[in-house]
Image (tube, rainbow, N blue to C red):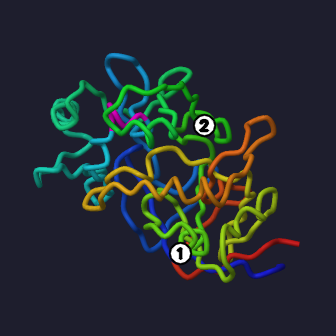
Amino acid sequence: MGEMLGTVEVLRRYPVKGLLGEEIAGGDVAATGLTGDRGLALVDAETGKVASPKNPRVWRGMLALSAAIDSGGVRVSLPDGGSVRAGDPHVDEVLSRALGRRVTLTSTPPEKAALERAVPEEVLSEGVTARVTVQESVLGAGSPPGTFFDYAPLHLVTTSAIAATGVEAVRYRPNLVIRTAGEGYVENGWAGAEVAVGEEVVLRVTVPTPRCAVPTLEHGALPRDTSALRTPAAHNLVEPLPGYGPRPCVGVYAEVLRPGRITSGDQVRLLD
């Protein structure tokens, strides 16, 4: 083992892509990520694309719904206090009514699965209800096939980066929040490195995570906060991939080299 990077402070999973998720004490990690994470997604019946609040004019209401896993499977809690289970025969009807748009809940990604991503800078300047430039983004370029991840199966954020942005970690939708020493966006320096988490899991950190408009939106009871994007845009412009251009980044993506179990409090170490 090499340098101590930090400890796992929080684990989170998001059973339905784009909805609020849940904090867990521990979980199994495979090549396809944390068990139960992004196992389901909503598909827009009109466009055939995966629904995502990355296009906030259409889908920001998704962040008023939350999903959790219990003994009965995935349960989605609704803004009116009700709930519906993924296996209920009327689940699509209930979720379509809640979101004001016809959707289908599925565990199978559409062929060439994609979502719509509004240009974040335009959302900041024009507002969440404005018609702004929308780009198509293909899912899972850094993930095993058949998954709903934006890029890679795990997303890591450090407490140092969260302190630098001054907003809540949950806005960035991480799987692991890692308590770190030092100031600023320390995880930028992890890209390309292999890290051990606890006694079993080995990850390869791939690229810094470019941010969209999602962290700025209302998240349940949390109000809209544009500093979640404006602050990294001012202080952490990074080029995630060659030719991608500098983007405001918070956190890093990672792929799983050795599966196992991660629990809160696990040490995170750089491998020699």
Residue 263 shows which numbered tag? 1
Residue 140 shows which numbered tag? 2
Residue in the picture at 71% in, 44% down: 246
Circle 2 residues within 10 Å: few <14, some 14–19, many ≥20 = some
* Residue 164 quadrant: bottom right
- For label 1, the SS is strand
- The reply to whether callout 2 and callout 1 are in contact (CB within 8 Å) is no
**Residue bounds of the magenta highlight:** 55-59
How far across and down, in percent of the image, does residue 216 sit? 42, 52
Q: Distance between the residues labelled 2 and 1?
A: 25 Å
For discs 2 and 1, the disc positioned in front in the rendered view = 2
Instruction: Give the vertical position of 99 relative to 102 (above or below).
Output: below
State left or right for residue 153 relative to residue 85.
right
How far across and down, in percent of the image, does residue 113 sit? 52, 26
State left or right for residue 223 relative to residue 96.
right
Q: What residue type is labelled 2?
A: Gly
Q: Is the magenta stretch mostly helix, strand or loop?
A: helix
Q: Which of pointers 2 and 1 lies earlier in the amino acid sequence?
A: 2
The one nearer the camera, 30 or 155, is: 155
- Position of the C terminus, as image quadrant, is bottom right
Instruction: Give the vertical position of 90 relative to 217 (above or below).
Output: above
Q: Among all residues in the image, which is located at the extreme front?
A: 125
Residue in the picture at 55% in, 40% down: 150
Circle 1 residues within 10 Å: few <14, some 14–19, many ≥20 = some
- Position of the N terminus, as image quadrant, is bottom right
State left or right for residue 195 relative to residue 210.
right
Residue in the picture at 81% in, 62% down: 193
Instruction: Give the vertical position of 251 relative to 32 (above or below).
Output: below
How far across and down, in percent of the image, does residue 11 sit? 49, 68
- For label 2, the SS is loop
